[in-house]
Image (cartoon, helix red, strand yellow):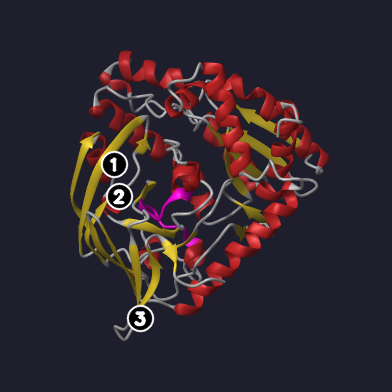
Amino acid sequence: MADKTHQEMLAKYAEAIVKVGLNIRAGQRLIINLMATRGVPYQFAPLVHEVAKAAYGAGAKYVEVLWGDEEMLRLRAQYAPRDSFDEYPTHTIDAIMNMVNNGDALLSINGSNPDLLGGLDPEVVGMMQTRHLNATSRVSEKVTTNAINWCVVAAAGEAWAQKIFPKLSPEKAQEKLWTAIFETTRIDQPDPIAAWKTHIANLRERAKYMQAKQFSALHYKAPGTDFTLGLPAGHLWISAQSMAQNGVAFTANMPTEEVFTLPDRNRADGVVTSTFPLSYGGTLIEDFQVTFENGRIVKVSAKKGEAALQKLVDTDEGSHRLGEVALVPASSPIAQRGHLFYNTLFDENASCHIAIGRAYRFTLTGGEELSDEEFIGAGGNVSLNHVDFMIGSPKMDIDGVHQNGSVEPVMRQGEWTTKL
């Protein structure tokens, strides 16, 4: 990468985002959302401008950007009247929905400070987070049904970079994080687009393998984890690429190393221990355990951020249950980097994980056509939340449990038991 300037790498990154992540079609509009990143916005302007150029080059007829400033959230949590947290201007949500309802594309750029709201009153943070989830639920519903081509990517925010590389100067930390982003998204390859096509094909083969097994449940065993998770009839194993309802094949996350499906919301039993910290709503939750009975979270504990974790679980009834199960080998390229990213987009691709809250409708056969009640009846979960947390490690074994009770190894010591 040394022979290419940072701006050249940004241009290659933007091209991959537009052609692989979003797969922009001629005539589509694109809305770029930085509000959810809670990052100081204009440090991402060079990437946003390259994405706009690439999108117009692919035939997009209009590109709009919603800029946000994460410091405004912290200031609100610190200084706003406690009875004011029902306030949530909806003009940004309306703008996104205007695009989504027109079949246009949505890009979210993530570069948030993992400690943004750390040390603040968890009651206030919880109120803010719940109001945000309620306000954005219209967009979340469209995303979880793949109504349009959407993608989430990262940019090297200064505070985020310093969290990962605290011994480096701000400039050097950002430079190192940009390098990590480029490498994990294959932008350092001679032909990133071709590298992505190969990677997507390999993940698709793994998803097809898991689909053919039709396991009734998965059993996880690792230090601090002994956990059985049911899989509903009609579950679909999904990998990097999906087909949107607007007819565009897209890759929702860059990077991505997972194959995933939905669990049965009523069949989760045992204890899981986190293997990575969870950055949720600007608070870092560390060294935590979650206990399940009959699908429901009945206990949480954490060495740091326990109140925030409990607030997450208490958001609504669906937040007491799970909506995603994802398998990632412990030797994934992101895990091999040997450091945490303190960002779910990356850390979930270094480790097997599960998600508290909402299930993606497209992970159940015919799920997009079901009402909430029908989806719940089929084993799917409905919630304002969808929050992944990491439980995998090189010490984890996973077995697939067939309908007849027979057991088959899926992973041993964090690695797939079957080479494809």
Q: Which residue is mark 1?
A: 312
Rendered view: 335 above or below 280: below
Q: Which residue is mark 2?
A: 319
From the viewer's perspective, tell me whether residue 5 is left or right of residue 417. Answer: right
Query: Magenta segment, which residues?
Result: 349-361
Q: Residue at x 80, y 37 (%)?
A: 56
Q: Residue 346 magenta-drawn? A: no
- Given residues 216 and 249, the one toward you in this image is 216
Q: Secondary structure at mark 1?
A: helix
Amino acid identity at mark 2: Ser
Where does residue 152 sit, x and y in percent of width and height?
A: 56, 42
Q: Residue at x 44, y 29 (%)?
A: 164
- Given residues 219 and 95, the one toward you in this image is 219
Amino acid identity at mark 1: Leu
Where does residue 11 sit, x and y in percent of width and height?
A: 74, 33
From the viewer's perspective, tell me whether residue 84 is left or right of residue 166. Answer: left
- First in sequence, mark 1 or 3: give its number: 1
- First in sequence, mark 2 or 1: give its number: 1
Q: Is residue 248 visible?
A: no
Q: Which residue is mark 3?
A: 402
From the viewer's perspective, tell me whether residue 331 is left or right of residue 420. Answer: left
